[in-house]
Amino acid sequence: MLKRPDPFQALCPTRRVLDRIGDTWAVLILISLDGGTLRFNALRRRIENISQKMLSQTLKSLERDGLVRREVFATVPVTVEYSLTELGRTLAQTVNQLTLWAESHIGEVEAAQQLYDRGLTPPAATPALSRR
């Protein structure tokens, strides 16, 4: 019988996946590619402030994880396109839900941050939410 992964354990492989999901650049790349295939420079233009090195490293990690497909075309200069794999699409759907949550609740988060920064306590969460 297979033991269920426990991400609270230091050596659990699930942590690597959670690290990927928690990486800002990976999330932005997944969201960008969810709209369709893009070339390297198009991705770089789409994601402000990402360096060429960081984009390259993150794409390689996503490719290694089976989330992104890299396709090279023998042109001069060489053309490289990136797209999501089927597995990558399933993660992009989840990431898009997180993005929608962030967009819907950014006002509340910013209000809580302002209260906190002024030394005030943000209002308590509703009992139903605080139990989760």
Image (cartoon, rainbow, N blue to C red):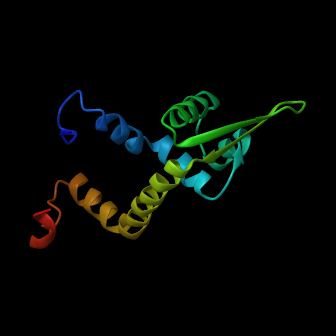
**Image point 20% across, 42% down: which residue?**
4
Point out residue 43 in the picture as x, y percentages from the top left corner.
Answer: 66, 45
**Residue 126 in sight from this viewpoint:** no
**Residue 46 in sight from this viewpoint:** yes
Quadrant in the picture for residue 129: bottom left
Q: Quadrant of the C terminus?
A: bottom left
For the residue pair 101 and 68, the one nearer the viewer reads as 68
Quadrant in the picture for residue 102: bottom left
Quadrant in the picture for residue 120: bottom left
Point out residue 80 in the picture as x, y percentages from the top left corner.
Answer: 75, 36
Q: Residue furthest right?
A: 76
Left or right relative to 112: residue 23: right
For the residue pair 103 and 37, the one nearer the viewer reads as 37
Left or right relative to 110: residue 46: right
Left or right relative to 127: residue 104: right
**Image point 14% across, 60% down: which residue?**
121
**Image point 21% across, 39% down: which residue?**
2
Point out residue 16 in the picture as x, y percentages from the top left corner.
Answer: 35, 34
Q: Quadrant of the N terminus?
A: top left
Q: Identify whether 97 is placed above or below 47.
A: below
For the residue pair 21 and 117, the one nearer the viewer reads as 21
